[in-house]
Image: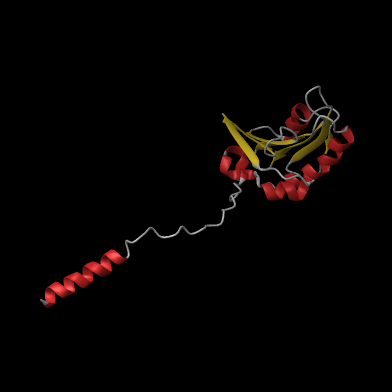
Amino acid sequence: MCTRLYLAAAATLLTAGCAGDPAPVAVPPVEPVTVEVAAASSGGACTLLDFGVIEEHTGVRFDVAAASDRKDTRTCVVRAEGATLPELTLTVTDTSIDVATFTADVQPKGAAKVSKLGRAAYRRTVAKTAKQGPAAEVGWLATEKRLVTLRWTCERGAAKADAEELTGKLIDLARKLDTRAG
């Protein structure tokens, strides 16, 4: 009899919790989380770039990077999401040229020489076109036998003076790049 009494009590307790579904609990909405991906994650010459360092030297925040490798040349293009300009392009090419060849054959006519950047370096601005604004360019022969170019292409409405100002910022950025790593 005791066993029957215990079984009846257990059955009553077990079924008592099944009387109805529990009331739903309100959960606050979750804000989407944005995770910043490093430029270096794109590979190629992007391994030499960091979005924070670019912003520190240029005042512009980029957040999209794309890389390309072709034979001895590695390239990286960085932009702000949703915008095609401005853009910053870094190109690194393995080379065997010397300073004299760089100065005679690579450095564009009219470009200004830059000191304390690699073995030889130049800076220049390029006039705007119908599709893009002017460009600022810094090129140098790195000590580890690499030809490196940083090119900033401005928005269509930018003045050439804006590009000229950017060449100084690109020189500072170029001095921060460890071209041995790419």
Q: Nearer the viewer, residue 115 or 63?
A: 63
Residue 68 coordinates in the image, percent (x, y): 59, 32
Residue 37 coordinates in the image, percent (x, y): 59, 46
Instruction: Residue at 52%, 57% (x, y): give it.
Output: 27
Horizontal arrangement in the rendering, residue 170 relative to residue 49 (left or right): right
Instruction: Residue at 83%, 43% (x, y): give it.
Output: 168
Residue lying at the far top of the rendered structure: 130
Indicate whether 54 appears above or below 92. Answer: below
Horizontal arrangement in the rendering, residue 99 relative to residue 74 (left or right): right
Q: Nearer the viewer, residue 8 or 61?
A: 8
Residue 160 coordinates in the image, percent (x, y): 87, 32
| Quarter the C terminus occupies | top right
Q: Nearer the viewer, residue 5 or 180?
A: 5
Residue 112 coordinates in the image, percent (x, y): 85, 35
Horizontal arrangement in the rendering, residue 7 relative to residue 61 (left or right): left
Whether residue 165 is visible here, answered yes or no, is yes
Indicate whether 18 appears above or below 122. Answer: below
Whether residue 150 is visible here, answered yes or no, is no
Indicate whether 172 appears above or below 79. Answer: below
Residue lying at the far left of the rendered structure: 1
Q: Nearer the viewer, residue 174 or 19?
A: 19
Instruction: Residue at 68%, 32% (x, y): give it.
Output: 97
| Quarter the N terminus occupies | bottom left
**In the rendered image, which quarter is residue 163 located in?**
top right
Question: What colour scheme has been applied to the protein in the rendered image?
Answer: secondary structure
**In the rendered image, which quarter is residue 148 located in?**
top right
